[in-house]
Amino acid sequence: MSTSVIQTTSGKIPVDAIHYAHSHEHLYTHATPAIAAEKPEMVLDSVQRIGEDIQLFKAAGGNLIVEMTTVDYGRDVAKLHDIAVNNDIHIITAAGFNKGSFNRGLLEHQTINDVTAYLLHELVHGVGETGILPGVLKIGTSLRCIQPWEEIGLRAVARASKDSGVPVSTHTQEGTMAEEQLDLFKAEGLSPDHIVLCHLDQNPDLELHRRLVERGAFLSYDSIPKPQYKTELRSIQFISKLAKAGLHTQIVVGGDFSRKGYYKGYDGTIGLDYILKTFIPKLRSYLEDEGQNAQKIINDIMRENPKRAFALRHP
């Protein structure tokens, strides 16, 4: 039995409690006032409706969700705790910030030390008066660039992670700036194996994926169910190719659902069970045709890799 633990909204759990995990989702979010007014479908505000999808996820074998909504996009950790308790599921909530246009107001003109202190306060004392501790740190960067205020956030997140042992999961816009993020984290002394780089399935450069994995980072393929990104087949092919080199052990997967239309509980069409019930059988068939050990690879990306990616580094 492993002694490693993961920080959830309900407290620390041993990593061995994980069955199957989604690496990146949005279950409850108020969004920003501007987005809520213009695109109300991006407001996820029903504990009951999201519970319908979580039950589907559980029935398919899942029991851990990394919820990546941040303070600059309407995070509500109390509601996430309610969702976890009501549905008997493990949820990780995030400290930190989204990408540039969202995080600018909270990061620009701040010092790295002040932002680090703010993050550490949440990680040690909990969010607001809730006492709920985040289990992952998030920061995002823009398309093909890192804005000056995003660099403040990157460095602060790196320092908070080093001090707290809480892992980092980043937003990369269309899978860009991942290497630059790692370089900056390295300059701050943060080990790549503390880092999950999200949305990498949107980047078609397999050699980039190889380099990132070989450096020790985890890659999150989390646009898979969304038809507009068309990353499902690419994700299957990349997982297979990486597995042939023994590099799939740094891949985690998710759906990054952020609209009502993705959730069956909101009368959407995809559902939180899509990855386990639709994507994984497709991946299994492809791997078997390639002569690979499909069950081991699937078990790694859905269970063993998340155990390592989201464990506290010094609990």
Image: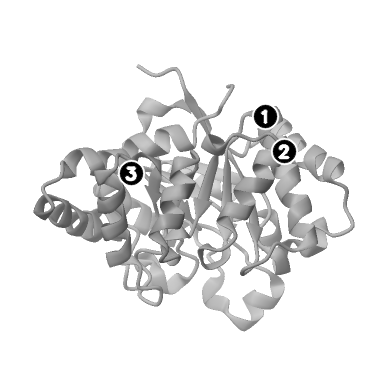
Residue 294 place in picture, x, y as percent: 17, 45
Report the residue marked by disc 2. Answer: 188
Amino acid type at mark 2? Glu
Q: Report whether 172 appears left or right of 280.
A: right
In the image, residue 51 above or below residue 13: below
Q: Report whether 118 appears left or right of 270.
A: right
Nearer the N terminus, badge 3 or badge 2?
Answer: 2
For discs 2 and 1, the disc positioned in front in the rendered view: 2
Q: Residue placed at 66% from the left, 43% from the top? A: 185
Report the residue marked by disc 1. Answer: 164
> Are dots 3 and 2 in contact, CB under 8 Å?
no
Dividing the picture into quadrants, the one containing residue 226 is bottom left
Report the residue marked by disc 3. Answer: 248
Nearer the N terminus, badge 2 or badge 1?
Answer: 1
Q: Is the N terminus in the top left, top right, bottom left or bottom right quadrant?
A: top left
Q: Which of 112 and 57 lies nearest the eye of the viewer?
A: 112
Dividing the picture into quadrants, the one containing residue 142 is bottom right
Q: Label 1 crowding class (10 Å Cα cut-off): few <14, some 14-19, many 20+?
A: some
> Are dots 2 and 1 in contact, CB under 8 Å?
no
Q: Which of 274 and 298 lies nearest the eye of the viewer?
A: 298
Residue 86 place in picture, x, y as percent: 44, 44
**Badge 2 element:** loop
Q: Residue placed at 35% from the left, 67% from the top? A: 231
**Badge 1 element:** helix
Q: Label 2 crowding class (10 Å Cα cut-off): few <14, some 14-19, many 20+?
A: some
Q: Label 3 crowding class (10 Å Cα cut-off): few <14, some 14-19, many 20+?
A: many
Amino acid type at mark 1? Ser
The image's mark for residue 125 is none
Residue at mark 2 to residue at mark 1: CA–CA distance: 14 Å
Residue 172 place in picture, x, y as percent: 57, 60
Q: Residue placed at 35% from the left, 75% from the top? A: 227
In the image, residue 130 above or below residue 174: above
